[in-house]
């Protein structure tokens, strides 16, 4: 596979001279862990399908990584070849990435929920040589799915199955032989070693709109985000990280796979989100930090409030993916006894903004934080002119962690001549430099020439005692252009009418033109694997209302 990263020499020079790019790869940090603290626990996972947990020290993880890396070489995986895998949060996920880095291959994680249509496109575009899947996860037969699309993927040489049998067994192919004792190992790894500016991760965006885009990252772009992220939160080797967000999403990958190794600490992985299991894991392992989307925070808070366990060790819950409703922040902080931190970011650049540990509640609740080190943000109008504090416009980002292009789609890079990346989000930046994401540029509702503050209205409705989740989209209207439709998931045993939510919002003194004019009660909202609501699907439904 030939990659064509967009990495101008002046960017490399500027980022290096400024000290943002560490110039290291993730296996450098792994080797440090093995040398300095080999018996420290690196990973604790739980395989819900096999009903077993695995605990690996850094010494044990290192041996498995080397064994897998040499096994991939035996299968013919060369430098820049793509190794794809569709795995839950199991130890093999972490080991595969580290093994790929050892031999200069490119890691391409895929969400377990993807099926034939998505995989055919993604594996084909990446020209993947190896695909690793579970034999079964949540009742789904992954080997059968891959067998059905193999003929459409001429570059795919091997499908390896964790828990499988025969020639396709992951265990037989990559773990059965103790290759790591080979005397040629060091020489081979040195020859294959990638530079910190080589593409090391290919991660498809989770698809809130259109064709999935293959985001390309290097070690430098990802690490230049993780290091200031950890510094802002005061994380170090004494912390323990829980990751229940999928590691095939950037949240799980950067802060559940890479960050614990860079901190020289322990990652506790959860493959299926069950809040009671999370509470137990926090208590058993002394977890101090976790990051997930808002629904995870809500579930964990409800579980602890019900008396299901003790999470006294948890210091920080970082919520990202969508603004955190005020009511949830207040309830979660009181119930969990942890700092609730708000952040915003993208697959393309990791966390961009984050609140600080000592920020007042008004910032935690009312903003998505301020930029991390090495990050610049600005809001511009339709003519690309920067707007003053407090005005809504299009959010642009220029940062050390910006990706290096979309695979085979250089025309979509969306950076201007000065290096500003168009995020596609609408936002406001206050006088102190804190940003508030107000919606996607495509999500805006314009009713009779006036913009409806969608995120604010959703946040108010989230406080309604009968509402579990809510999303507001526009319904095309001949006279006004658009009217607001609220898609609502009620709490169990609750019912709602349009009159109920209108009355509730009127009590909050919401302007009449901002009130939803249609209510759709649904069992669930369509979401991406990271928990973001797929409003484009709701807009498609809303179009039928107009007809």
Image (spheres, rainbow, N blue to C red):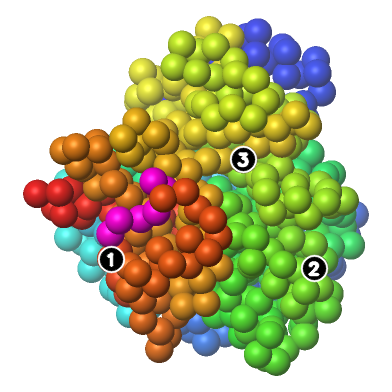
Instruction: Judge left or right: residue 214 versus residue 544.
Output: right
Whether the magenta-drawn stretch holds residue 26 is answered as no
Q: Which circle marks residue 338 in the picture?
A: 2
Circle 2 — which element? loop
Q: CA distance from mark 1 to mark 2?
A: 35 Å
- Residues at circles 1 and 3 in contact by the CB criterion of under 8 Å: no
Mark 2 or 3, nearer chain start: 2
What number of labels is visible? 3
Residue ID at (66%, 76%) = 301
Instruction: Judge left or right: residue 538 versus residue 86.
Output: left
Circle 3 — which element? strand
Range of residues picked out in magenta? 513-518
The N terminus, quarter of image: top left
Q: Nearer the viewer, mark 1 or mark 3?
A: 1
Q: Is residue 92 above or below residue 194?
A: below
Measured as percent of width and height from the top left, residue 345 is found at 59, 41
Q: Which residue is mark 1?
A: 520
Binning the other alpha carbons within 10 Å of mark 2 as few (below 14), some (14 to 19) or many (20 upward) gives some
Residue ID at (58%, 9%) = 418
């Amino acid at each position: 596979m030939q990659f064509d990263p967009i990495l101008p020499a002046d960017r490399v020079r500027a980022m290096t001279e400024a000290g943002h790019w560490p110039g290291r790869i993730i296996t450098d940090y792994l080797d440090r862990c093995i040398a300095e603290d080999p018996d420290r626990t690196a990973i604790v996972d739980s395989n819900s399908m096999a009903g077993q947990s695995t605990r690996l020290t850094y010494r044990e993880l290192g041996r498995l990584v080397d064994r897998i890396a040499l096994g991939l070489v035996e299968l013919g995986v060369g430098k820049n070849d793509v190794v794809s895998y569709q795995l839950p949060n199991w130890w093999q996920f972490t080991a595969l990435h580290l093994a790929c880095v050892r031999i200069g291959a490119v890691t391409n994680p895929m969400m377990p929920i993807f099926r034939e249509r998505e995989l055919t496109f993604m594996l084909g575009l990446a020209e993947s040589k190896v695909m690793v899947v579970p034999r079964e996860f949540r009742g789904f037969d992954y080997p059968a799915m891959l067998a059905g699309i193999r003929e459409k993927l001429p570059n795919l040489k091997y499908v390896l199955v964790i828990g499988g049998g025969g020639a396709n067994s992951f265990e037989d192919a990559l773990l059965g032989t103790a290759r790591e004792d080979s005397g040629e190992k060091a020489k081979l790894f040195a020859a294959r070693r990638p530079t910190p500016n080589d593409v090391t991760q290919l991660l498809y965006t989770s698809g809130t709109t259109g064709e999935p885009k293959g985001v390309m990252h290097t070690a430098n772009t990802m690490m230049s985000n993780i290091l200031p992220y950890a510094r802002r939160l005061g994380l170090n080797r004494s912390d323990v990280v829980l990751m229940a967000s999928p590691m095939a999403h950037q949240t799980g990958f950067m802060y559940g796979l890479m960050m614990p190794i860079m901190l020289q600490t322990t990652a506790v992985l959860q493959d299926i989100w069950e809040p009671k299991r999370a509470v137990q894991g926090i208590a058993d392992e002394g977890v101090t930090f976790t990051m997930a989307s808002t629904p995870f925070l809500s579930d964990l808070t409800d579980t602890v409030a019900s008396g299901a366990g003790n999470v006294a060790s948890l210091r920080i819950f970082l919520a990202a993916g969508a603004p955190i409703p005020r009511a949830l922040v207040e309830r979660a902080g009181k119930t969990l006894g942890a700092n609730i931190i708000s952040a915003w970011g993208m697959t393309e650049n990791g966390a961009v903004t984050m609140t600080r540990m000592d920020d007042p509640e008004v910032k935690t609740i009312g903003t998505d934080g301020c930029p991390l080190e090495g990050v610049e943000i600005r809001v511009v109008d339709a003519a690309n002119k920067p707007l003053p504090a407090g005005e809504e416009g299009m959010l642009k980002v220029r940062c050390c962690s910006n990706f290096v292009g979309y695979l085979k789609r250089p025309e979509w890079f969306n950076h201007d001549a000065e290096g500003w990346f168009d995020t596609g989000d609408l936002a406001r930046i206050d006088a102190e430099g804190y940003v508030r994401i107000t919606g996607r540029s495509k999500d805006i509702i314009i009713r009779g020439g006036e913009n409806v503050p969608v995120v604010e209205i959703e946040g108010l409705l989230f406080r309604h005692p009968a509402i579990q989740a809510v999303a507001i989209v526009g319904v095309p209207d001949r006279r006004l252009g658009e009217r607001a439709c609220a898609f609502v998931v009620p709490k169990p045993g609750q019912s709602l009418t349009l009159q109920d939510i209108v009355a509730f919002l009127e009590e909050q003194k919401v302007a009449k033109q901002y009130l939803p004019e249609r209510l759709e009660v649904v069992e669930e909202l369509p979401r991406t694997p990271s928990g973001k609501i797929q409003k484009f699907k709701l807009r498609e439904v809303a179009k039928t209302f107009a007809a």
